Image (cartoon, grey):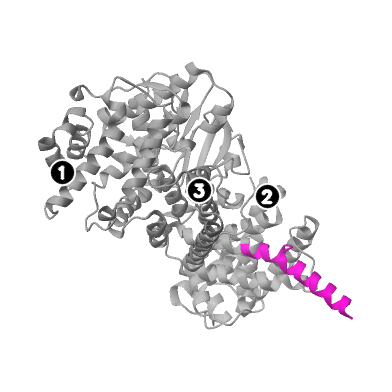
Amino acid sequence: MKEQTRIPVGKVSRAARFVKTGAKVGGNYVKHYGRKMLDPSTSREQLDQDNAADIYDSLSELKGSALKVAQMLAMDKNLLPTAYQDKFAMSQYSAPPLSFPLVVKTFKQHFGKSPDDLFDSFTKNAVNAASIGQVHQATLNGEKLAVKIQYPGVAESVKSDLKLVKPFAMRLFGLNEKELDQYMGEVEGKLLEETDYELEVKRSVNITDECCDIPNLFFPKYYKEMSSSRVITMDWLDGFHIKEFLSKNPSEEARTAIGQALWDFYHHQIHNLKVVHADPHPGNFLMRLDGTLGVIDFGCVKEIPEDFYDAYFKLMSADLIINDEELVPVLFNLQFLYDDDTEKEKALYVSIFKEMTMMLGKPFHSDSFDFADNTYFEQIYKLSERISKIKELRNSKHPRGSKHGLYINRTYFGLYQLLNMLQVKINTTKPDWLH
Amino acid sequence: MEKKVKSQKKAVTKDFLIKHFIQHVLETGTEPVSVFAFTKSLKCTEKEFYGFFNSFKALQKSIWAGWFEETISSMENEEAYQNYSVREKLLSFYFSWIELLKDNKSFVQIKLEKLEKADMNPDFLGQLKEHHTMYISDLMTEGKDTEEVMERPFSDRYHKGFWVLFLMIMKFWSQDESEGYEKTDAFIEKSVNLAFDLVARGPLDSMMDFAKFMLQNRM
């Protein structure tokens, strides 16, 4: 991996970078309409691709929380045209690393020893970049270890970064300010949590202990004595990221086993633990050809409040959707409807919501679901594109939908998306009370 | 009589004098009024003091120079250091330097606070500056071999720029209130990266080259 030659310094230059991107994106629109004048059949796809490339280029130089926001937006496929997806998905794999002397310094500060003294071997260059840190490979007593080190000053830059992203994201993703504020507030809280590596180790140990009985699922062991607020040491897991995995032509059994393990993993967390690994981006899953799955990175964990859980999963039962009288109170509960909505608005929102929930809840409505069905995903994208164009919704004075939904929706989108990529049919288990 | 006194007294060494000088500055905020008063309080003779230093100025210079040597030797003890690129060596130097200053933060702060903003060559850092200049020049020579540093008409004066950077880092650190001086880490990392981007081959060199070519060919 090539080391980054220069990191934009300070708020001003970061802002400058966004402005530059903004200008470029603007330019892309000009190009788009120019092309369209000459050739009316020009699709938005080219425009989206141009935009995605420029946005990605600038975000990847920003590191830290801006990169995280890119990842988050990348996961919310409903917010992003397809062209953005691939570009942003790359951000998990390639952020520029920090210098080795700083790594050594960080180690000395936290453990009183340099990495060479602490481990039998330690790679000088980062083998992988996490969004707010980088990963080195180490060995100790014959064991391969992964050592994650956080960039300095990340926590401090979270807030200023998010402020910068805000106007940019509003325009780019067609969100209104209220929606975005709610979104950003939740994201900020989670990002700050992610910078707390001690909390991450604690959570990782908890969740992995709770989930270790799920078949075909593997977790690294975490080493508390070699971890601190800025460093996490864990077992090195072998395996491939999903795209690489799929390029090796895995057998259908292997894909199905992995897909089922994914589903079971989330099922157990959401319905039994009510604490969920809310970062289902491809970089966190290591897949192996024997049909086993390694899960890493518990930086982003969402605790699901009980009342939200009840309301949210009630919607997954097919009967409720048909029954308006029961549905409407639930929608109030989830902050999708408000008291000062007019009857006309209410009717509109209820119909939108029904359609959306029917669509997203579909895997829950039968005992098994074929995620290989691309038409299902196209329907979702079409629907979300249509919803994003509904004027009333965009101009609404209230954000629609509870903020807790952000991470849960994102988790499900991420999960569905992974299962779709795996092209598998899954036994979609549900909690007993949903039957 | 005389023998008895000597046996009770601690041996006067360079470190002993430096330690008590720093202590005096920390406790009173000023230098001792005279070598006489200083040595009297330490129960030693002026002659013993002058055996090591000509003046308090010289003593102060040697404090900073001593820290420099300590930093270099601690770095060179690192196994990895020898394999570092020039950029990494310099990063490592600044990180280690700040680590060492942490043990003497109050003293450094007193000295740096009194420093005028534009004063790039304070007296007490004289010897340190010489060491630093040598060190940077060595690194630059090495960098030219590894092609990390571009040979330019003014490249023998790079050390002046790095000296300013060095002072900036110290000042930034002495005012840094972030947890564990994280911001200083970021400051060092970013500024050294920028500095090395500037001394490496870049668009400016191609521009100069091209400009020269155009000038020559218009004639």
Q: Secondary structure at mark 3?
A: helix
Q: Position of residue A48 (x, y in %)?
A: 49, 51
Q: Nearer the viewer, residue A278 or A260?
A: A260
Q: CA distance from mark 2 to mark 3?
A: 50 Å
Question: Do circles 3 and 1 both sit on a common chain?
Answer: yes
Furthest residue toward top:
A253
Question: Do circles 1 and 2 both sit on a common chain?
Answer: no
Question: Do circles 2 and 3 both sit on a common chain?
Answer: no
- Give the residue number, with chain letter if any, for mark 1: A333
Given contact means CB atoms under 8 Å apart, are the residues at marks 3 and 1 in contact? no
Rendering quarter of residue B131? bottom right
Q: Position of residue A112 (x, y in %)?
A: 52, 46
The amino acid beneath tag 2 is: Tyr
Rendering quarter of residue A359? top left
- Give the residue number, with chain letter if any, for mark 3: A45
Q: Main secondary structure of the magenta part?
A: helix
Q: In the rendering, which numbered label is found on residue A12?
A: none
Q: Residues within 10 Å of mark 3 (few under 14, many from 20)?
A: some
Given contact means CB atoms under 8 Å apart, are the residues at marks 2 and 3 in contact? no
Residue drawn at x 37%, y 55% is: A174
The amino acid beneath tag 3 is: Glu
Instruction: Indicate which label's residue lies in the foreground, 3 or 1.
Output: 3
- Give the residue number, with chain letter if any, for mark 2: B81
Is residue B217 found inside the magenta-colored segment of the image?
A: yes
The amino acid beneath tag 1 is: Asn
Q: Chain of mark 2?
A: B
Q: Position of residue A429 (x, y in %)?
A: 29, 22
Q: CA distance from mark 3 to mark 1?
A: 38 Å
> In this figure, what is the number of numbered marks?
3
Instruction: Indicate which label's residue lies in the foreground, 1 or 2.
Output: 1
Specify whether residue B161 is in view.
Answer: yes
